[in-house]
Image (spheres, coloured by chain):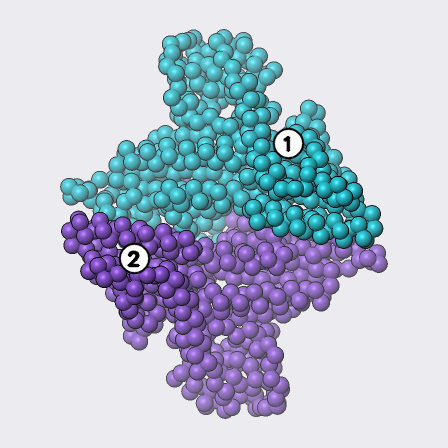
Chain colours: A purple, B cyan
């Protein structure tokens, strides 16, 4: 199997798919729109999950688990939410198969095992969770409830892409219940901050925090906060959202609490989530034509040591030294792999770990050992250096930290160069077509105009940035008055 | 809400349900047969998962993730497996809901969105995984594949019980592929050993390892290894299984590899799993009429400190000391909670943490502090001791280890006292009715006899213990010749 991938310049979309498949992150499956997350991809997800889970717990949240299925009557209770997801949900209608009387060895759905009420496979869990919270909340003493769930969800998408848009995906969904509006808003903002911190400091992916326009809001939310990242092809990718749900779900499920003053009040809600989509974002933000470029803080393998030897004697000496280095690196908490597999040549291994985005590669040869040095290559810049083996562990540690910073800075420079202020429609269209990126432009604030711009250009309002500068201007399309610029982009 | 639970002696089954609900492990849900795992129960599952996951990785396995849905044509490919699960599977037939034209605000299944091929919600993943492995395996170099998955599965059970038997449950399922029969058998045995080690050394629950009879074998397996535990009511509970699948799935999905000698051969398979059922086992193995008794190695909270104070000044002094103790315990890796909530009295807190099974409770009073002592209560024996605060952390560490051992020994003594050799039918029936436990008895080896015994007594063969003594005897029911005793019990 050739390990070559289509260059980005030739076909960005094909480059992305090639990379996912050849780096061993995921594979297609026999189920329409569903993918298999392969061990290397899953290890990446585990690392992301562990960091996020720690952050959730540090901010007072606990994990729990709610049912996969939502009875239709609960699903439809919050009307906007139901309307938003009804068109793309998998529905369980029967609970048994039976032998096909006309076709030995084959099974058919047993018509006698039809459910009285259909079950929706959760596309998101507000409905089932708020129906449960109803039983848990009586008084202000029961609040807040700060719960997160790691789970799979299903949204029947017509066009799917590995990681970015799949019928089933893995995610976490936080669902919190609060006594006051203010507290719920603080929570909503806190969690988008957690996501931004994770994206920038772990994924090395700069993001813009902002609020969604009404058109792009989560179905059932009063406000949706988002982090938006820029991919190398100039398209934006929504990477995490945090929703202030107001009292919408409390009203739909009649969840009231008794205040300190002994009055019944509806409960305030938030929900927030990130998904395996982040793996797609990570791939597209940093990788190149040779393969993945992974930030050291999330890489399943941070350092790979490849021995270069001729003959058994030479191998034994290198094995011993590599084992020592490996132990010392592990003691520093560095994830290291020693690949002394006899079946493949060093050149093949170099290409393989380049493809897999391992941040640091050490090539350890017999002559190097005599000179007490090692050749160290970094994945991000492809720079190679011969380093002294004295205190090599500390040097590697510094290098990993440099790589993490460099990847972020490179992505940030690219992102910053691709936010442009545009003031007229022709430049708006031209910029979208020729350059992409975020376009900061005035908008008259109406859903109609946003919809029209989308129809004409495929660009959407990614967000109204937080702490946005207020300035008077004219809408890019209608020339109607506007008080602020918003960020437009074509998006994944 | 009263925290009293039904005593075991009055109604064991009700005791179990009361305990699960009142200790906050789980709750019923709006979905038939599905439960909500509450934060305390989920924290327990996380601890179990983390220990097991580490063991899986230490034995060379990697995690991955496969689709939730199995197309019907794949599901039916391995006939025995399909037959075993067809009667209890949730089936997705449609992918969209639409507005009910006769009922504004309500949704109905959109008949135009019927799937061409129905999707089974996975009851287990052999089919979807072996269909995937087919694409991953060409030569002996691709083997072994050692993959585990943490996932939810659905089996449409008619009678459900919290944790023990629910329509949806969480589990892990290992699925490995090997070049030789021998290697697959070694893997099967290795994993039942991993489970036994986990059950005994972490859950403090003694288990018997053995092989299932043909009747009790996993659908599609050549051999099923099991660990069987004994609950306090004398019923057995299958706690984990590891299956040698032979070449059944390789043949059903046509998965062949090219040997070193360049010949095509079918691949050999294993699968193995444990589930959230283990939480039910843990509860029933150790708990008492006051609540949970959790083994320290898995307890979400290992030590709780409750302050006993009068007035703010006294509280401040105790707060300071408790904070110091808490820090020192945390430094030792002990999970400690300081409950200085003003809203509840100490007595209420004592009962609450007893209910939750926290292994060690420290009651820290003003007078105690003056005397440099603290009252320490252990949950398992309810013994209280006044200990010096000097080196209290080391004393607590020892105590936790003592509790872990004591819980195991207590369960083991009970289990050992409840394995009896029985040689005649009347005693067999009498023992089952009056005492329960494992009955070691001769069996003629036929499925028919096993089935008859099950019909007559509800007892099943739990396993043929590993390294079973060979001895001639007469079948307990048919008096036909037998070469070994097997273990019978009524089971969950």
Where does the image place residue A142, in percent across and percent down from the top left? 73, 52
Asked whether the viewer can see residue A18, the reply is: no
Residue A55 to residue B184: above or below: below
- What residue is rendered at 56% in x and 59% in y? A55
Q: Label 1 crowding class (10 Å Cα cut-off): few <14, some 14-19, many 20+?
A: many
Chain designation of label 1: B
Residue B381 to residue A195: above or below: above
- What residue is rendered at 69% in x and 30% in y? B383
Where does the image place residue B286, in percent across and percent down from the top left? 60, 30
Q: Quadrant of residue A444?
A: bottom right
Q: Nearer the viewer, residue B105 or B169?
A: B169
- What residue is rendered at 62% in x and 51% in y? B327
- What residue is rendered at 70% in x and 64% in y? A183
Residue B118 to residue A491: above or below: above
For the residues beneath circles 1 and 2, the answer to whether they share a chain is no
Taking B374 as reference, is A294 left or right?
Answer: left
Q: Nearer the viewer, residue B290 or B262?
A: B290
Q: Which mark is residue B380?
A: 1
Instruction: Tell me, yes or no, whether the two marked residues, 1 and 2, touch with CB atoms within 8 Å.
Output: no
Q: Which mark is residue A305?
A: 2
Q: Which quarter of the rendered picture does the N terminus of chain A lie within?
A: bottom left
Taking A42 as reference, is A196 left or right?
Answer: right
Q: Which quarter of the rendered picture does the C terminus of chain A lie within?
A: bottom left
Q: Label 2 crowding class (10 Å Cα cut-off): few <14, some 14-19, many 20+?
A: many
Where does the image place residue A331, in percent across and percent down from the top left? 41, 53
What's the CA distance linking mark 1 and mark 2? 50 Å
């Amino acid at each position: 199997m050739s390990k070559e991938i289509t260059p980005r310049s030739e076909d960005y979309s094909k480059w992305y798919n090639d990379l996912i498949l050849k780096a061993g992150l995921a594979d297609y499956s026999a189920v329409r729109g569903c993918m298999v997350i392969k061990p290397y991809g899953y290890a990446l997800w585990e690392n992301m999950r562990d960091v996020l889970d720690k952050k959730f717990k540090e901010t007072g949240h606990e994990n729990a688990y709610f049912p996969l299925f939502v009875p239709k009557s609960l699903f439809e209770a919050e009307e906007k939410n139901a309307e938003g997801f009804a068109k793309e949900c998998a529905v369980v209608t029967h609970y048994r198969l039976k032998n096909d009387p006309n076709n030995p060895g084959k099974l058919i759905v047993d018509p006698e095992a039809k459910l009285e009420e259909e079950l929706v496979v959760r596309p998101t869990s507000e409905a089932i969770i708020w129906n449960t919270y109803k039983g848990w909340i009586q008084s202000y003493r029961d609040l807040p409830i700060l719960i997160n769930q790691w789970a799979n969800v299903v949204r029947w998408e017509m066009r799917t892409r590995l990681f970015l848009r799949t019928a089933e995906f893995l995610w976490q969904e936080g669902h919190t219940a609060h006594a006051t509006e203010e507290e719920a808003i603080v929570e909503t903002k806190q969690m988008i901050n957690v996501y931004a911190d994770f994206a920038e400091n772990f994924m090395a992916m700069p993001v813009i925090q902002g609020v969604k326009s009404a058109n792009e809001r989560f179905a059932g939310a009063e406000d949706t906060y988002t982090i938006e990242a820029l991919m190398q092809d100039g398209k934006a990718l929504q990477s995490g959202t945090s929703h202030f749900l107001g009292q919408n779900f409390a009203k739909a499920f009649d969840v009231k609490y008794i205040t300190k003053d002994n009055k019944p009040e509806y409960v305030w809600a938030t929900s927030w989530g990130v998904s395996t989509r982040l793996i797609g974002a990570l791939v597209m933000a940093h990788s190149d034509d040779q393969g993945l470029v992974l930030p050291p803080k999330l890489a399943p393998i941070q350092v790979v040591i490849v021995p270069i030897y001729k003959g058994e004697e030479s191998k034994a000496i290198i094995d011993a030294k590599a084992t020592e280095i490996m132990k010392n690196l592990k003691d520093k908490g560095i994830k290291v792999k020693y690949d002394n597999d006899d079946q493949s040549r060093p050149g093949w291994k170099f290409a393989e770990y380049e493809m897999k985005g391992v941040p640091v590669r050490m090539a350890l040869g017999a002559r190097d050992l005599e000179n007490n040095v090692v050749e160290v290559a970094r994945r991000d810049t492809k720079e190679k250096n011969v380093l002294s083996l004295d205190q090599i562990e500390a040097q590697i540690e510094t290098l990993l930290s440099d790589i993490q910073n460099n990847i972020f800075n490179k992505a940030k420079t690219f992102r910053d160069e691709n936010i442009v202020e545009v003031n007229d429609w022709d430049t708006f269209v031209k910029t979208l077509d020729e350059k992409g990126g975020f376009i900061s432009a005035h908008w008259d604030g109406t859903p109609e105009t946003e919809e029209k711009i989308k129809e004409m250009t495929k660009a959407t309002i990614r967000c109204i940035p937080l702490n946005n500068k207020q300035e008077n201007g004219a809408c890019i399309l209608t020339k109607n008055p506007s008080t602020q610029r918003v960020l437009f982009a074509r998006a994944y």
